[in-house]
Amino acid sequence: MTDIPKSRIQADVESLAAGKFTGEEGGPLVSPGKDLAAAAMVAIIGIAAMALSLDLDAPASLYTAPGLLPFLTGLSLLIMAAGLAVKALKRAHLSEILKAAGNPIGPFLAGVEGRRTLVLMGLVLAYVVLTDLINFEIRMPAGFYTFRFSSYETISIPVIALILKMFWRARWLACITVAAGMVIALAWIFRDGFEILLPGSG
Amino acid sequence: MDTVFAQLASQLAIAFTPWMLVVCLAGVTLGILWGAMPGLSTTMAMALLIGLSTGMSQHVAVMFMLGVYTGSVFGGAISAVLINIPGTPDAVPTMIEGYPLAQRGEGGLALGTAIAASFLGNWVGIFLLIAFIPAILFLALQFRSWEMFLLAMWGIAICGSMSSGEMPLKGWISGWIGLLISFVGLDAIHGVARFTFGFRILEDHISYIPLLIGLFGLTEVLKVLPQKNPPGIPSKVGRVIPPFSMLWKYARTSLRSGLIGTIIGAIPGAGANVASFLSYDIARRRARPEERAKWGKGSYEAIVSAEVANNANIGGSMLPTLTLGIPGNAAAAAILAALEMKNIVVGPTIQTENPGIIYFIYIGLIIANFLMYFMAIGLIKPCVKLFSLPRTLLMPLIIPICMMGAFAVSLSYFDVYLMFIAGIAGFILHRFGFPLAPMVLAVILGPLADENLRRALLVFEDHSILSVLIDRPLGTVLLLVVLYTFYDGIFRRAK
């Protein structure tokens, strides 16, 4: 269920050698179990879209009803979900898929890459929430130039330094220096160079 | 005709100011360096830089984005040849052929060939763009509601097919989910709130720009950063002299690849990857036996075929973007976003609503191509130094850019959360094998499809289906094209 996908480059090299068309976003086929799970999810989305569309008012005729295309989209998604499920079941028997599925989240969490991804998601979420909640800007006029330091830099520098420490694995000083240099440079380009308001700048 | 010359002259005067050239140079340089870094794709560069372009004036923003686009498509070839890791996915064929050459000490010549081929490819794309825009604009002006609806649906359907290769169904599902996202908000005809769940902020629709940044910026970070990647070992570059004589030797391949690249670029969803892969494959089949024997072991003809095609793709992708408002690929969607943020209405009326902007885009592409040629030669050695930087150092630095970009669009924190959700959703969709470009394209085209379908149905209220098919031949042709796209995806591709 949580097979690690082949790298994009590897899959592309193989498809080129075989003269096969893998599409603009390429990549190999995922397991039938994943396709079946995706089909179930898509079917739920389709049904929900149809139900919500039927609830919408139709002020004039049916032809201009606001829910018309959303309903048709939901219906098409339901049909596509059925198609995806059929394709998955053609590749493997349902009992095999269920047997292979077992605990769908466990193997992802058991792998180092999976855990690192989850931690990264958590850190990015914390970063987004913190910059939303904390807002301030300090201005320090110094002759012809006003130095500005906002909550954006205050939050970004430690968070990016922490992410660098986790993944780059350099010394703390190096991580903090890189994070500070990058964030301050970016803030300067956006705020002073292009006069774009930064998140958390009040 | 006088108006055309007057518009062209005024756009030339704007484009050839020193500041504009500096902006284009900055865009090309940034694009080449970005494209050269493994893991940083053209689309990612374009998506992230939309935010920066909000602070620029109309022409500056367009010039900057065109520079980045042109530079980053070429940039992928540098790391492909020198460290055997393609900077962008479309450089995989260049990697297969260029790295063996670099190991034999011909890295400089391989890169020189790639630079010259890219330069030529851009020219083919620009020439065909200029040649075909008037005809497509004329055709597009004949479109009414029914045709516009079908065109939007074809854009989403073909994008789904082209993005996911072996499983077009997944591309369509991605597109259809994008359609549902596009319906969120007040509907354009009656003002009824759809899928807003009582949240006032959703009534204003979901902007596709934070989605684009999340799906192609944050998703890439989540995909790449946790992976352990061995660093590439740069090969010796040697002297880089772009050999036009070699292109002459492969003139037929160059021309064919340029045509393939431009045509593929004009098809929504099919971008530089499909163009370079298809061109490489066709060139291999058509190569002379003695040349074919070199394929996979270091063939200059193969490099020419791939690099001409992926660069010609740029001009091709601008064709539907400018004339129909349908982005040729995800990178072109970012150009579309930058244009729309600067109040440039793309589509059939682009010439009347924004006189001269098309000429400015032609000029911008030509300037960017010349600058790309010279900067590519100059930046190869600095790029080799950049390759020693690990991805684990670069990728975390993308995160604050994603956040700034999403916020800068409308100074709304809702967009930042949207970018984050899109990033997570993009990661999950990728793990389940769904392409992302159809979703973005559908969010862009959804309102167009919805409004035009309902208008068309109202017009056709008293007509029989047969009379509609006969009275609207253009619509009938488009309907057949849409049906064929589905037929091809379901039946032919399955074989």
Image: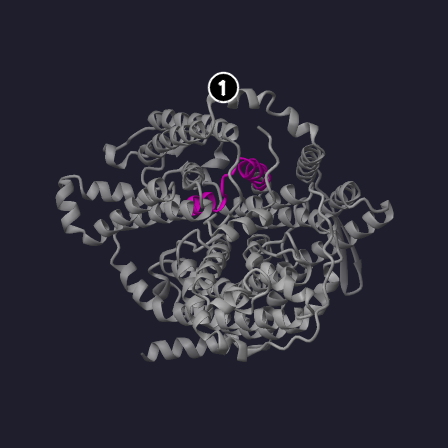
> Does residue B472 appear to the left or right of B114 in the view shown?
left
Q: Note whether B101 is above or below B472 in the view shown.
A: below
Magenta stretch contains residue B296: no
Question: Residue at 69% across / 42% down in the picture?
Answer: B227
Choose between B365 and B273: the one closer to the eye. B273
Q: Position of residue B83 (x, y in %)?
A: 69, 59
Please provide the residue range marked out in magenta: B419-444
Question: Residue at 59% across / 58% down in the picture?
Answer: B96
Q: Main secondary structure of the magenta part?
A: helix
Question: How are the residues colored?
Answer: one colour
Residue B89 falls in image quadrant: bottom right
Other residues around mark 1 within 10 Å, as few (<14) / some (14–19) / many (≥20) = few
**Kind of element beneath mark 1:** helix
Residue B296 falls in image quadrant: bottom right
The quadrant in which the N terminus of chain B is found is bottom left
Q: Note whether A129 is above or below B302 in the view shown.
A: above
Taking the image as drawn, is residue B198 in sight? Answer: no
Q: Chain of mark 1?
A: A
- The amino acid type found where label 1 is placed reads Ser
Q: Position of residue B247 (x, y in %)?
A: 51, 75
- Total residue callouts: 1
Q: Position of residue B19 (x, y in %)?
A: 60, 73
Taking the image as drawn, is residue B445 in sight? Answer: yes
> Does residue B328 appear to the left or right of B234 in the view shown?
left
Circle 1 residue? A95
Q: Position of residue B172 (x, y in %)?
A: 41, 40
Magenta stretch contains residue B429: yes
The quadrant in which the C terminus of chain B is found is top left
